[in-house]
């Protein structure tokens, strides 16, 4: 694995940048977050004032079933730099984030969770890394003690499996919380896939990436909407969109099973010739039948995982549907109108 040059190394090859006159876009996907939004805006506006950049906060209401939209609009009235995109229903965090990224106009873009698990205080350090030459500065959780042991264990297993199976290296314990240069965001916007595993896409684009360690706090209020089943599906999306190993491995498993079967058959012939027929082997027969049945089902299932995703891409539906936009000067062409 070749690690990307750090910002310090990068500084030697790219001229230093300056934040003067630059614009920062924050992207905040919100799903049922009414309890935490006031605190979120307080903290982030504080931090943004310290950073001293012109900014916009693009909030994407991802089909919340509580008063999230009303709260967002109240803040939009108070501070016009807070803009709101209201999606037509709940599309999931990855898609909501894409909707937000598509709407940003800044020179730097920071996606952030509104539950304050991504500490806004880190944004200042991201901007410093950007000035030092990094195109992407991403937060890495050094301490996951806020997560349950099971969540930590499964997360670690996922990173290991993902990195083993795909060409893209996902940095361990990096979330979506990061600062990206405009150029990186433009590349992300061009990616046509519907199945958006953002962590993977973030790593796939490359550029000069710099890790910034931080301790991830607990949710400030409200509850996480990720359950284990959802996380499992998320992991499956991630692996299937970045690796074809699960669909290709079955030919090898098939060959191995075939070789084993030939060996077993040969052994049985020799045994019968030497010692004659003994008690008919129902148990071993059943084991073989069940095992091959199971393997076939797994193989077909893994085919299905990919076929299903091909089907999704081929349908070519827009990624998301925007119902309303608040605070954007000229209405941007939405995904539906955009030429394919
Ligand atoms: N979120 C979203 N749509 C969803 C689920 C979550 O926009 O369907 C947002 C949520 O409002 C929050 C962020 O994604 O800003 C992270 O969600 P959460 O805190 O539930 O995830 P966790 O921190 O447990 O991974
Ligand atoms: Mg959270």
Image (cartoon, rainbow, N blue to C red):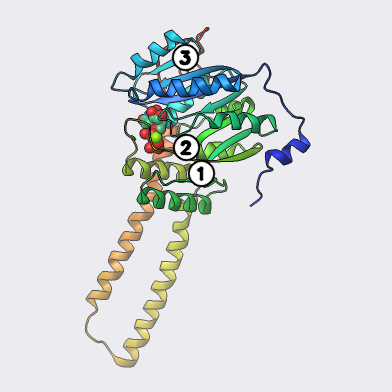
Q: Secondary structure at mark 3?
A: strand
The residue where tag 3 is placed is 83
Q: Is mark 3 within 8 Å of ligand 1?
A: no
Q: Secondary structure at mark 2?
A: loop
Neighbourhood count class around disc 3 (C-alpha, 10 Å): few under 14, some 14–19, many 20 upward: many
The residue where tag 2 is placed is 197
Looking at the rendered image, the disc whose residue lies closer to the viewer, 2 or 3, is 3
Does the image show residue 92?
Answer: no
Q: CA distance from mark 1 to mark 2?
A: 9 Å
Please identify the quarter of the rendering in which residue 298 is found: bottom left
In the displayed structure, would residue 120 be above or below residue 235?
above
Q: Which residue is depicted at the point 45% across and 51% down?
A: 156
Q: Contact (CB < 8 A) between labels 1 and 2?
A: yes
Q: CA distance from mark 1 to mark 3?
A: 33 Å
Please identify the quarter of the rendering in which residue 311 is found: top left
The residue where tag 1 is placed is 242
Label 1 or label 2, whichever comes before in sequence order? 2
């Amino acid at each position: 694995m070749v690690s990307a040059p750090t910002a310090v190394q990068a500084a030697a090859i790219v001229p230093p940048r300056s934040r003067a006159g630059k614009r920062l876009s924050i992207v905040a996907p919100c799903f049922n977050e009414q309890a935490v939004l006031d605190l979120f805006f307080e903290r982030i506006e504080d931090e943004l004032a310290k950073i001293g950049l012109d900014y916009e906060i693009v909030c994407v209401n991802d089909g919340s079933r509580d008063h999230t939209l009303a709260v967002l609009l109240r803040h939009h009235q108070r501070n016009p730099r807070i803009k709101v995109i209201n999606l037509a229903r709940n599309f999931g965090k990855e898609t909501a984030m894409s909707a937000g990224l598509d709407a940003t106009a800044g020179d730097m873009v920071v996606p952030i969770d509104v539950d304050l698990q991504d500490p806004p205080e880190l944004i200042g350090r991201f901007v410093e890394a950007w000035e030092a030459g990094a195109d992407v500065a991403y937060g890495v959780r050094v301490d996951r003690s806020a997560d349950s042991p099971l969540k930590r264990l499964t997360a670690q297993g996922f990173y290991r499996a993902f990195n083993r199976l795909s060409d893209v290296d996902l940095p361990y314990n990096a979330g979506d919380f990061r600062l990206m240069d405009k150029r990186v965001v433009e590349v992300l916007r061009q990616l046509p896939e519907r199945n958006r595993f953002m962590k993977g896409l973030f790593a796939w684009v490359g550029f000069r990436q710099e890790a910034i360690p931080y301790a991830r706090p607990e949710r400030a209020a409200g509850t996480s909407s990720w359950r284990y089943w959802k996380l499992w599906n998320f992991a499956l999306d991630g692996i299937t969109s970045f690796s074809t190993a699960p669909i290709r491995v079955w030919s090898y498993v098939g060959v191995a099973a075939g070789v084993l079967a030939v060996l077993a058959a040969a052994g049985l012939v020799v045994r019968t010739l030497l010692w004659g027929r003994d008690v008919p082997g129902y148990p071993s027969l059943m084991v073989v039948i069940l095992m091959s049945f199971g393997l076939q089902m797994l193989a077909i299932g893994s085919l299905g995982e990919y076929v299903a995703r091909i089907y999704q891409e081929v349908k070519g539906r827009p990624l998301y549907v925007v119902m309303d936009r608040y605070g954007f000067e000229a209405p941007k062409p939405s995904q539906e109108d955009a030429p394919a």
